[in-house]
Image: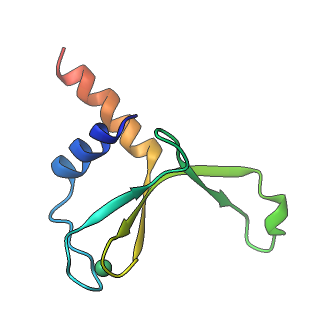
Amino acid sequence: MRFEDFVRFFKENTDGSCCPYCRKDDWHLILPSDDGFVTVPLTKTGAHPALASVAMPCIVMECSNCGHVRLHSAGHIGHWMLNQGKNNE
Ligand SMILES: [Zn+2]
């Protein structure tokens, strides 16, 4: 996935993008590299966090004004992209 893919996904699948805290509309992506993801560990209730064995890849966006952070499932975006390809065939 590329930055352009994320922009297209958000334009086509979100209803406005104002920050829920400051109402500004100025977001930037936080990526560990040009095309990487952030992973969120999924842990059972009561399990030790160090034993988490499953992780969810996410796209992280930060409000440029107040720093509020939001996450979107990279898997969901990837699935949407695959379906877009099928719809355009
Ligand atoms: Zn904000």
Residue at left offset 23%, top offset 68%: 26
In the orientation shown, which residue stands out farthest toward the top? Answer: 89
**Is residue 51 left or right of 14 when viewed as pictured?**
right
Residue at left offset 37%, top offset 35%: 2
**Is residue 58 left or right of 65 when viewed as pictured?**
right
Compare residues 29 and 14 and report the one nearer the observer.
29
Compare residues 16 and 87 and report the one nearer the observer.
16
Residue 38 appears at what percent x and percent y? 56, 53
Residue 88 appears at what percent x and percent y? 17, 20
Residue at left offset 20%, top offset 73%: 18
The correct choice, above or below, for 3 with respect to 50 in the image is above
Residue 59 appears at what percent x and percent y? 44, 53
Compare residues 5 and 49 and report the one nearer the observer.
5
Q: Quadrant of residue 45?
A: bottom right
Residue at left offset 19%, top offset 14%: 89
**Is residue 13 left or right of 71 when viewed as pictured?**
left
The correct choice, above or below, for 19 with respect to 34 in the image is below
Residue 16 appears at what percent x and percent y? 15, 65
Q: Quadrant of residue 8?
A: top left
Quarter of the image where the N terminus is located: top left
